[in-house]
Image (cartoon, rainbow, N blue to C red):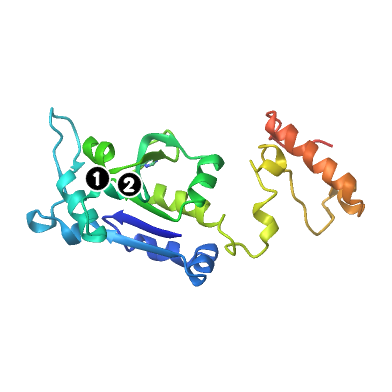
Amino acid sequence: MDVDVFTLFPHWFDWFRTQRHVANVLALGHTFKTVDYRATTPLKAGKVDDVPFGGGAGMVLRIDVVEAALRARYGEDPVSVRDRRRVIALTPGGRLLDETLAAELADEPALTLLCGRYEGFDERIVEHFCSDAVSIGRYVLAGGELAAMVVCDTVLRKLHGALGDEESAVEESFSAALEGAPEYPHYTRPAEWRGWSVPEVLLSGHHERIRQWRLERARQRGAGGGGPPLP
Ligand code: ADE
């Protein structure tokens, strides 16, 4: 997969690249690049934003700035980029990110993520250049960078070779293996701590009983029983 993130803060992603699952997929040949809107802005003094028409607080990322950055990166009119790769605007009002969307994006050969800042994007950017608008939750961040990292984190960990143990992405929260439910609880050593013991079935070595117990606990959590463990 080839991922491009357009941002005003490319260095924020230096840390992200060092995360193990990200580093793993980069070592396998996938790419993760950042593009700085300011590097190609047609405006003076690195300007990228402007006041909203109609008044109101904050600044809006300009369409000419985003167009210049997309053109410089892809060498074509940005209206046609979305025909061959998903171009995603990160915005609080977009489609809510969930496992279904993450799995859909993990199947794509290439993604472009556009981070907004301040009050967000000129709406024409979303309308004419983007295939998707994605939100990581119904709250407002200062910009799309953290949202882009969240999207990339959950998408990249699904790629083959991202995780140490290939099984760990199969039977996890919201997966088909767990009927879309949150994951069952995990326990590790010590088997007893301050009188708090691990459910006996997990120590039984009985794989079928363990499988049944886990599925049952996942179903309970999915039904709203996500609190402390039941006996
Ligand atoms: N930009 C600002 N807030 C956001 C959110 N909640 N999701 C995606 N992008 C954003």
Determine if residue 60 is in view: yes
Q: Position of residue 65 (x, y in %)?
A: 17, 50
The residue under the point 55% across, 40% down is: 100
**Is 144 rendered above or below residue 164?**
above
Residue type for callout 1 = Val
Q: Position of residue 189 (x, y in %)?
A: 80, 59
Secondary element at image label 1: helix
- The answer to whether the residue labelled 2 contacts the one labelled 1, judged by CB atoms less than 8 Å apart, is yes
- Quarter occupied by residue 58: top left
The residue under the point 73% across, 38% down is: 218
Q: Residue beneath label 1, please?
A: 79
Judged left or right of residue 40, residue 158 is right
Judged left or right of residue 169, residue 189 is right
Judged left or right of residue 82, residue 45 is left
- Quarter occupied by residue 133: top left
Q: Residue beneath label 2, please?
A: 82
| Residue 131 vs residue 91, the one in the foreground | 131
Judged left or right of residue 216, residue 85 is left
Q: Position of residue 85 (x, y in %)?
A: 37, 51
**Is 75 rendered above or below residue 95?**
below
